[in-house]
Image: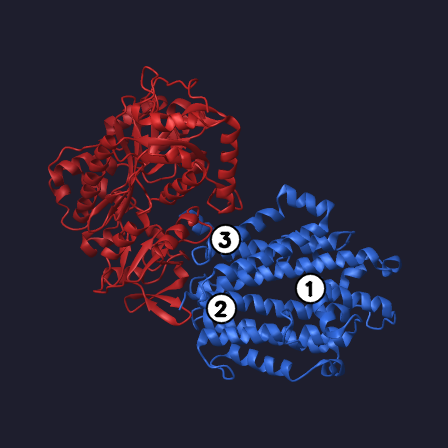
Chain colours: A blue, B red
Amino acid sequence: MMLSRVADHQYWMARQMERAENLARLVRVSEEMLLDDETLARGSAHEYWTPVLAATAMEGAFRSLYPDPQAGDVARFLTLDLRNPDSILSCIRQARENARSVRDKISDEMWSEINALNLFVTSPEGLELLQRFPQAYYEKIITSSMLFDGITDATLTRDEGWNFLQLGRLLERADMTSRFLDIRSQSQPTTVDSALESLQWGAVLRACSAHAGYRRVHGGEISVEGVVDLLLFSNEFPRSVRHCIRRADEVLHDISGTPTGRFSNPCEKITGALLAKLSFAGPPEVMARGLHAYIDELQVQLNAAGQAVFESYVLLPGEVGRHFPRGSRPESLADWQREQQQQQ
Amino acid sequence: MMLSDYKGANLFDELVDEHGRIRPYYRGVAEKLSGLGHDELNQKLRSLELLFLKQGITFTVYGDEKGTERVFPFDPFPRVIPAVEWEHIEAGLVQRITALNLFLYDVYHEQRIIKDGVIPPEVVFSASHYRPEFIGVSVPKDAYVHVCGTDLIRDRDGRYLVLEDNGRCPSGVSYVLENRAAMKRVFPQLFGASGVRPVDTYPADLLSTLRHVAPRENPNPNVVLLTPGVHNSAYFEHSFLARQMSIEIVEGRDLIALDGFVYMRTTRGLRQVDVIYRRIDDDFLDPQVFRKDSCLGVPGLVDAVRRGNVALANAIGTGVADDKVTYAYVSEMIRYYLCQEPILDQVPTYLAWRDADRKYILENLPRLVVKAANESGGYGMLIGPTATRAQLAEFHDKVSRHPRNYIAQPVVNFSQHPTLVDGSLEGRHVDLRPFVLWGDTIKVLPGGLTRVALTRGSLVVNSSQGGGSKDTWVLAA
């Protein structure tokens, strides 16, 4: 048993940390690709980024903030722009704010790491690194998130809070892996340049740290089917969607105490159904349906799972909005809350 | 660190006496400190600051749009209080909290002190934190102020004077504990055989103080800490204390009052709450009773308190006792309730609503400190000798128009303590906030928060106004 709000903070702390890490992976690989992509000669760097923005559902936000995009704007938008609520910096800030709210529930080492990362990303050293050696900057964010994960594993008591934390990380990881897969299908689907195609699928694998895992199972040659098989259906690869969903399903059953294979609330129902779907399908089904459409469906179910967690454990029905004056907008609400907290 | 260059001043110096000799109880630590090389000291200071920053031991500065988090500046030269001095302080604080609790019980019940003409009725009834709606309401064990942080200063003779009592939600104790932990980590050699009394039992003592007022016969009462939230300047302290006591830290939205009981909302449904260590002012506790627009409180909380189903620490309405006008009468309270002479002296206080006093205040503004009766944190204050013409005129106007809201005191040039400024030692004014707990016994934390006014000559020690802090050592013998 734990406070519902604390469960929510633990969940989002892990989820935003994982999101920051995955965005860093994405930007790092994309920038690397940019360096040796021949299409650059043909189109603008900005076009190159379009599928990245589309897959992460940030295209609209980008266009409204940067109506006339210049070189480097996408990377800036994804990395340090606080106006983008899903930029790496925004995610780290929010993860840290969530950690601060559960400071008494996490280990000192976890807090130190998340706090140090938050300080690093906008420190003079950090910004200089980003300027001169961006790969190392993103590397540092990725490593810090993985370190946080490791510290959590090594220091946090295995109680309900741990489960909510795992749940956040696993659902986000499943979501991001599926988005990475979608990037390729969003860029010119009619391309016939197979050398370029395998280069791009290689980048997707790298973004998921899946290169070595891929080679072990499918050998050196990179094929769409192989990548889909590993990233969606592998039971063993820790970043595959199926693996994440299986773990999330276990964690949910651990929280409720319901035996696996049954469900006691909507989120267990969703993850259970999703797991069955991923366990009894493979690349042929995906190819028949079309990769993009398949992933779209997957995303809808992943979102539903996250929403169901919130509704089952955080929200008490009928309790929503009881403190808030009628008709106030979310932004003004946040300001007003902050103001009162400060008056104390 | 060069001690030989350090000079006292024309006021009480904690380290050296009027002949410039180091006081005997400082010799041990002074010797060890002077043994540290310049580079070594700087390196240690840098690692300290980094430690605080990395651990997020920060407070929030308001007035700035985003509420920037800052590290509370820390000075490594510990303040030393010998055992005999501490005994005096401790006895004075115990006497004071006893009188304040008797006073609060009295003003919310028979009001004998008023009827007997010891305190004028206006003093109580016009205090902005007086809560007439709590007259006749009993609180568990008749305890009103469970946690008190009393500010002390020393005048030029070294006499400890009470500057104010903080009987609502005094903060700062987490820095006492964190400062000590940091000192042990970075300057272990200073401690040696110095016989410094430990401070780390505070969280356990606080917890037993809170459990003491649990209303149900329950061997394991559910005690929670109610915080305004992460944007509050003292949030670090709230989370620190909750963690040390292993209790839940809750926000208003985590609690719900149903049929006169208070529950917290958990992933397994509702769980009853017995004691709330609240770090929210009365005004925000319950929108049904106090501020209607409060989003920090719990609707129905006050009703549950009235019915005796949940205990609040500190109780509602304690602000009438730490009001700056009431302050002027605390010595009288001690004589009235305890038939004792006050052990600790106070600073002479002029009350603007008394005609003669107001006249004196208005004529002598440049020589006085003027304070708003109900403000804290160094806000709403005028320091006459350093004020500009415009500030003097502003306060002249304020005092004339709202006499009840202002008091004035002579400027006490309170004691200074050597403080490291740009690598050399300089005297800076310090005060002391000890913490007193009122449970089944009265416990005074040996030490307290020594705050330092880091600006040369400044008498304002508040963290929000450029103050820092240092470790405070009470010696065992």
| Front one among B172 and A50 | B172
Secondary element at tag 2? helix
Q: Label 1 amino acid? A: Ser
Give x and y (percent) for residue A246: 57, 76
Quadrant of the image occupied by residue A141 = bottom right
Question: Of label 1 and label 3, which has the lower sequence position?
Answer: 3
Give x and y (percent) for residue B194: 32, 33
Question: Of label 3 and label 2, which has the lower sequence position?
Answer: 3
Residue denoted by label 3: A109
Report the side of B53 relative to B177 (left or right).
right
Secondary element at tag 3? helix
Report the side of B35 relative to A114 (left or right).
left
> How would you rate the neighbour count of disc 1 (Cα within 10 Å): few for under 14, some for 14-19, many for 20 or more?
few
Residue denoted by label 2: A163
Position of residue B366 relative to residue B136, above or below, is above
Task: Name the quarter where the N terminus of chain A is drawn.
Answer: bottom left
Q: Label 2 amino acid? A: Asn
**What chain letter is assigned to the residue under label 1?**
A
Residue for point 88% across, 57% down: A41
Badges 1 and 3, same chain: yes
The numbered mark at residue A209 is 1
Quadrant of the image occupied by residue B361 = top left
Secondary element at tag 1? loop
